[in-house]
Image (cartoon, rainbow, N blue to C red):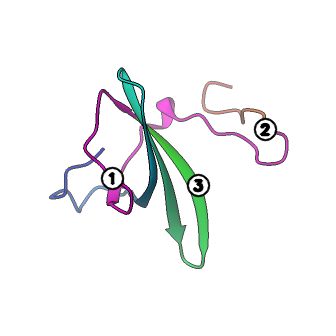
């Protein structure tokens, strides 16, 4: 995740909808809005996070750490690793 001061790095603008704290990691259930479209994005963050419902986040990803799934088949989409 990016600090609030980093506005140069391309990032997703997200709004937190729910927080799932497991102790070891926190899952932030968010909504990304791009133009008129929106998509659900789950962010897996290390340890406990202080983000709450309604908070806005800017996040960036490392392509090799992304796991994308088809909404139709629910199967993982192939990435750079094949």
Q: In the rendering, at what x and y percent does residue 33 appear?
A: 52, 68
Residue 2 image point, x, y percent? 26, 48
Q: Residues within 10 Å of mark 2 (few under 14, many from 20)?
A: few
Q: Are marks 2 and 1 in contact (CB under 8 Å)?
A: no
Please tell me whether mark 2 sits on a helix, a strand or a loop: loop
Q: Position of residue 28 (x, y in %)?
A: 44, 44
> Which of the pair 39/17 is nearer the observer?
17
Q: Nearer the viewer, residue 65 or 73?
A: 73
Q: Residues within 10 Å of mark 3 (few under 14, many from 20)?
A: some
- Taking 33 as reference, is 6 left or right? left
What residue is disc 2 on? 74
Q: Residue at x 35, y 23 (%)?
A: 23
Q: CA distance from mark 2 to mark 3?
A: 14 Å
The local crowd at label 1, few if under 14, some if 14 to 19, many if 20 or more residues have their Cα within 10 Å, is few
Q: Secondary structure at mark 1?
A: loop
Pointers 2 and 3 in contact (C-beta within 8 Å):
no
Q: Quadrant of residue 77?
A: top right
Q: Earlier in the sequence, mark 2 or mark 3?
A: 3
Q: Which stretch did the figure color magenta?
A: 45-74
Question: Label for residue 52?
Answer: 1
Whole-Å distance between the Cαs marked 2 and 1?
Answer: 28 Å
Question: Is residue 54 rendered magenta in the image?
Answer: yes
Rendered residue at 64%/33% (across/down) = 79
Which quadrant of the structure image shows residue 14? bottom left
- Mark sitting earlier along the chain (2/1): 1
Q: Which residue is the site of mark 3?
A: 40
């Amino acid at each position: 995740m990016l600090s609030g001061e980093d506005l140069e790095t391309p990032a997703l603008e997200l709004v937190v909808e729910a927080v799932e704290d497991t102790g070891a990691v926190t899952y932030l259930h968010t909504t990304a809005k791009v133009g008129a479209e929106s998509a659900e994005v789950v962010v897996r963050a290390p340890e406990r996070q202080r983000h709450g419902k309604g908070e806005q986040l800017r996040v960036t990803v490392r392509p090799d750490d992304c796991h994308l799934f088809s909404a139709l088949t629910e199967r993982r989409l192939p990435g750079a690793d094949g």
